[in-house]
Amino acid sequence: MASAAERIGAIVEAAERAAESVIDDAEAQARQYLDESRAEADREAAERRSAQAELIASLLAEAEALREQAGQMVESLRRAEEELAGKPGSGDGSEARTETARASHLSAVADPEEERGGSLAGARLLATQMAVSGSSREEIALRLKTGFEIDDPAAILDAILGPED
Amino acid sequence: MTEAGLAATQALEERYLMRTYKRAPVDFVRGEGSLLWDADGKEYLDFLTGISVCSLGHCHPAVLAAVREQAGQLMHVSNLFYTEPMARLAQRLADSSLGGRVFFANSGTEANECAIKIARKHAHRRGVSEPEIISFEGDFHGRSYGSLSATPGLAGNEALGPMLPGFRSVPRNDVAALREAVGERTAAVLIEPIQGEAGIHPTTDEAILAARQACDEAGALLILDEIQTGVGRTGSLWAYEQTPVRPDVITSAKALGGGMPIGACIAGPAAADVLEPGDHGSTFAGGPVATAAALAVIDVVDDPALLRGVRERGEELRRALAELEGVREVRGRGLMIGVGLEDGIEAATVGADLLERGLVVNVPNPETVRLLPPLVVDGSQIERAVGLIGESLLVFSAA
């Protein structure tokens, strides 16, 4: 017959085995939880990367479109400035303008052809400046119609803003 | 601060102030947004904004914060030293307009004095000994002697003469007269994109384009006075952005400081380096508080959504005004509006009646009511103002 001490020892041993089993279970559950969490985090990170990639691609496309539009505006501004100054392809031109003024007395009435050219260049500059300052296609079209009597400003607007969708 | 009341303030004014103004009988003590209150607590809708100075409305939080913060740090050291707000504001103004460089002043007339100096020196450099500056009749450029001499409507006051030599004017929007006037002696054409004090008369595209072409041919500068039109008033940051030209120089003031006194002369590359050390200066100009306020103003105004709102509200207001009885025509752009009244209706009487009714406007000439509401005015305030103007005009149309 086992002594009381032996019985207690057996109980303690059984309790220790039970505790180890509980710990093993807990560790297994924790590992499983961690694995699942890692998998979930990986899934979410992949989704975020994918969304970010899409956003970056979309922003890049927008930036590219803006760069193209800005290029068109700059080109249009240059053309308009050159035409206004009456000498295509020049740089600053202030000296040349002064020479022109010294060389010839200014006529009171401008050459009609020159006036038409200047007017068109002015219309283009007006449209470009309005576009740069945030005016809508409709607002610019209205000003071109009222200020320059241009009934169909589509060509000017397309050159500056790109074709209408 | 004592609250003396209108009668006491009027007595002090009568005794101690030079009699240069005919003031309306109101003693304003407080403002917030589009609203003002007088000493008796009566509320007014402000469609004048201190002649387009408080364009963001009274005591705009961003301007107020900038002024308070800067005033608590440093108020003045003079132009003998560097201060960051001035340099940053110059960058914002140049980058948002002509490039080039900026000279700061304390007011619009001083900004124009700077432009006049630039024009004259620029002309001397090309061998012109007696340079001339040409303006349109109806232009208003200021009240110091250079600007006054360029203001045809006031330069004729012989009691203040003689004016400075080298200024002449041609009829407003008269392209042939302008082309005839511009010649070898011309230093600059100095005009307003929209004449403000004359009663809101836009310079035509044809005239402004002719001015640009004539200046180019003569080697002269095109200077646009944007003191009233600039800083968002017409629906773009600068009014020239809605014209077919790019000027050589623009001048700004009024709305620039949001209530603080400041002016600026902005010169593009062709004129940016004309003035040299010793040519011009100012003790107060470009001070930290005024430039900090102006930076806050530009931060708020240089916003496509706000500027689009100015154009839309302006269109809404002009359309509604044009339908009122007693209105002959509505002129202007954005929220810079002149209401031309039918014959027989005195604008001064209407203006005084509107003040009684709680709407602040201005009467620049006998047949025009001028409206310069805050750029942040809302639809209900526009409706209220149009209603008040309509009621007033009904009374005087019938009279």
Image (cartoon, helix red, strand yellow):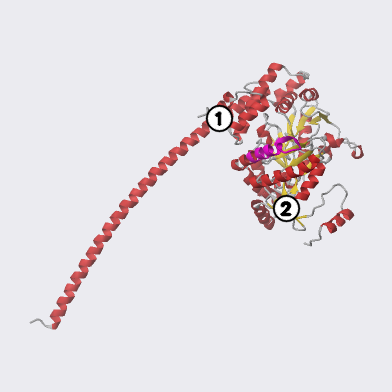
- Quadrant of the rendered image containing residue A149: top right
What amino acid is labelled 2 in the image? Answer: Leu
Classify the position of the C terminus of chain B by image quarter. Answer: top right
- Relative to the observer, which residue lies in front, B42 or B167? B42
B81 is higher (above) or lower (below) than B223: below
Label 1 CA crowd tier, 10 Å (few <14, some 14–19, many 20+): many
* Subunit ID for the residue under disc 1: A
Disc 2 target residue: B36
**Residue at the limit of the structure toward the front, as seen here:** B398
Q: Residue at x 55, y 26 (%)?
A: A158
Q: Position of residue B334 (x, y in %)?
A: 67, 38
Residue B166 lies in what quarter of the image?
Answer: top right
Name, please, the residue furthest toward the left.
Answer: A1
Q: In the image, B201: left or right of A19?
A: right
Q: Nearer the viewer, residue A127 or B260?
A: A127
- In the rendered structure, find residue A161 and report the number of the disc placed on it: 1
Specify start and end residues of the magenta stretch as a single range.
Answer: B312-332
Task: Say which of B60 and B280 sits in front.
Answer: B60
> Which residue is pictured at 86% across the width and 32% down the height?
B165
Asked whether the beta carbons under mark 2 and mark 1 sit within 8 Å of each other, the answer is no
